[in-house]
Amino acid sequence: MASVSIQFHATREELIKFIRHCALEFGLHLAAIKEFPLDEFEGHEISVDELPAYAKNRKFGTFALSVRPSHLNVSHINEFHDRNPHALVLEIGKRSSQGLKESWLFCNGGTSRTKAIWEKIAKKWKELTLAADHGFRYTPAAKELEDRGVPMLSMAGAPMTLGKKKRSTGARRA
């Protein structure tokens, strides 16, 4: 069973570009998900060409990658996860006047086929991010936002600092 869980700070634009690249590289299906309010779940199977339109619509803050179409006839995000254990899910941290919230790339299950793909995607993401001295991951664009005064927030909304960067264990060496 595949298990991926990476929390980090990144801009929405970086993340949309990344999932587009992954969908194309691995021939994956994409789903755009609106999960809040909780009683108004909405999910759409989308093409890579449709991704920019859904990316502009901020109500879609979660995207799922899968090797087959996702089960979207569900009433709640937890039911989505139960019916789609093979999906790699990206929850994009919202940017507001309070700051930029953490994002999360995760999958708690999968198949032998998806395990190899999810591990490649996780490795690729770690290569694109930096690891702070306290373990938080972030992109250079997120650090630039923090340096310009935009607060970095945990998923729960608590302030945090990205700290000093250190070389990621997955980073390419020059």
Image (cartoon, rainbow, N blue to C red):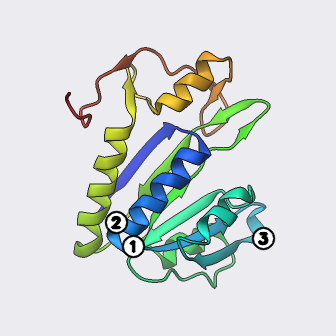
Q: Earlier in the sequence, mark 3 or mark 2?
A: 2
- The residue labelled by disc 2 is 25
Residue 42: name its quadrant: bottom right
Q: Is residue 2 left or right of residue 23?
A: left
- The residue labelled by disc 3 is 40
Mark 3 and mark 1: Cα distance apart in space: 23 Å
Q: What residue lies at 78% left-to-right and 61% top-to-bottom? A: 37
- The residue labelled by disc 1 is 86
Q: What residue lies at 24% left-to-right and 32% top-to-bottom? A: 169
* Residue closer to the observer: 39 or 50: 50
Q: Earlier in the sequence, mark 3 or mark 1?
A: 3
Amino acid under label 1? His
Q: Is residue 86 left or right of residue 76?
A: left
Mark 2 and mark 1: Cα distance apart in space: 18 Å
Q: Is residue 108 above or below residue 75?
A: above
Discs 3/2, front: 2
Coordinates of residue 65 in the picture (x, y in percent) = 46, 68
Coordinates of residue 164 in the picture (x, y in percent) = 42, 14
Query: Within 10 angstroms of label 1, few (less than 14), some, or many (20 or more) residues?
Result: many
Q: Earlier in the sequence, mark 2 or mark 1?
A: 2
Amino acid under label 2? Glu
